[in-house]
Image (tube, grey):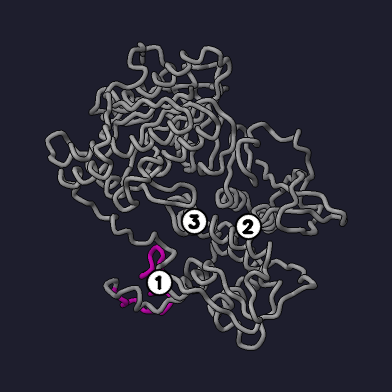
Amino acid sequence: MSVYIEGSLTLVENMFGLSLESFIVYNLAVKCDVDVNLCVVDNEGELKMILDLDKFVVINKNDIPRIGSYCKWPIVITNNKVVAGLCAVCRQIIKLSNNSNLKNLLGFKESCLMACSETSTWTKFCEVDIIKTTKDLLVDLNKFIENDCFKAPICFGKFEHHLNQPVRMHNIYKVARRVHNDKDLKSSLPIEGLNLNHLYAEGLYMTLADCIIYFCYKLIFTQIIFDGDSKNDLNLTSSWMKRMDLSELNINIDKKPDIVSIKKVILPKIKHTSLYSSEQNKYKQEISVTSEIIDDLNRSLHNLKISNNLIPFGDDLNFDWGLIPFNANPGAALPKNRSKRKCEQLENLAKSVLKIIQTKTSQKSIKIVDFCSGGGHLGILLSTLLPNSTIILVENKERSLEMALNRIKSLKLTNIQIVQSNLDYFIGKFNIGISLHACGVATDLVIQKSIDNKADFVCCPCCYGAIKNCHQISYPRSGYFKNMLSYDEYLRATRGADQTHDEENPKTKNGFRCMDIIDWDRKLYAEQFGYEVRLGKLKPSNCTVKNNLLVGILG
């Protein structure tokens, strides 16, 4: 297993220009006594640091396995698998460590920062928000200084507020009984009454989250001198920093000559919400989408003709599961009652991909990316059907990819590669992007990745109710829908689209109508970029209640 970071050469001996992410990964790897490969690149990065040459090997771009070019760096490569994304890479480094104390940074069941930033507020804070804020401060700290006052960024305010919230952790009552030496403490007591204060970011014990936030804060706090009581406005953060400075993760950073003196810290006004979970969404609870609401949506859309032709693209092709190797059939990995429906789902998408390839006879070598691949059922099937093509599985769940890897080995497939990362870290080139039941925003990320690559796409969406604006995607998608529907009206349709039950349920018809509304918006959006988009349904339609199929072919 190899860790790769990027760095640029400087005129000072042993000094390299690093990105903030590479700086964090390098320091964690040093603490974990894990070797690092540093690839020399042209971009300077946000930081210039003198590095210990005994802790890494300088390599050339030509020495990197091809799979290393699929993702934003830093990355970890092992065999035919690449891991990307700050949190995922840090998790891999900790797992490699022989230091049991540092292995505990992964927390309960090694789940710290396992969730992706699109769904976890906490991961987004550590992987996106605090990173962007730190980069902004490193680029121009003076932009946050006015009359000797430090106008703290929103992230600083959120973290200070977070440290003041009641601790939430697994087995919290058991922990409270041990901390307070009170065996009679009742589980009915509200957590606010447990008198457990944050010693670290996630409660009483240090985790990977502390590591990432600490390395960021250390860079900024070494550039600032807090005069008098100015640090009191960041009292909890300051106490946390002192604890981190005394921990195994302590790092020393040389102070800059142009250090700034601060007399007062001005914290931003923030919503009083916890970083433990997503902010309450007024549409989070199920909304009963009635026919009247559907009529209102139609009127807002000026009675736009939205039609689903019900026939999936590629339906005319023959498909024989008898010709598929046993281990490439989901029946080899799934319970019998799920196997039939899964086969039907996979067959629909596989036929769509084969049909696209038939229409693009000029393409000799096809690269297909199975986004949100899970255990790799679809990608592995296509790998056996298209032995001359390259299939890439992209999935952020390590355990799912372990199951996929076992099946790939048993089938002795050589044309399939694995990427463990969130969608936004994948930057590889490809010809067809596919996804089966990518949840909520993920489907739109797949379509956007395909558009950016001028690639065709085959998507069967899922979890419409999880759709919401995020740091990468905003809704509605198409220009037409943006002009006709407000964000709130759009969310009403997304929540209604999750009300697809059995055929006898009166909500089902409205649910399918809402699915078509959302997918028609996706269709119109892709057509703005020159795509011909087919909207159909999987056959048989009861193989899944989320049965819409979007196929986009670039003209």
Relative image position of residue 162 (x, y in whole percent) = 46, 70
Which of the two residues, 279 or 299, is positioned nearer the viewer here? 299
Q: How far across and down, in percent of the image, does residue 287 sit?
A: 22, 51
Residue at x 63%, y 53% (from the top left corner) = 97
Residue 269 in picture, x, y percent from top left: 46, 74
Q: State the residue position of label 1.
A: 272
287 is within the stretch colored magenta:
no
* Label 3 or label 2, whichever comes before in sequence order: 2
Q: In the image, is residue 257 above or below residue 434?
A: below
Helix, strand or loop for disc 1: loop
What residue did someone put label 3 on?
A: 123
Does the magenta-highlighted stretch encompass residue 171?
Answer: yes
Query: Can you say whether 99 is above or below 253 in the image?
Result: above
Mark 3 or 2, closer to the camera: 3
On screen, residue 447 versus residue 536, left or right, reads: right
Query: Label 2 belongs to which residue?
Result: 99
In the rendered view, does 213 fall on the left or right side of 401? right
The residue type indicated by label 3 comes to Thr
Image position of 143 (left or right of 341): right
Q: Secondary structure at mark 2?
A: loop
Instruction: Tell me the amino acid under the disc marked 1.
Output: His
Q: Real-space Cα distance between discs 1 and 3?
A: 18 Å
Name which residue lies at 43% across and 27% down: 552
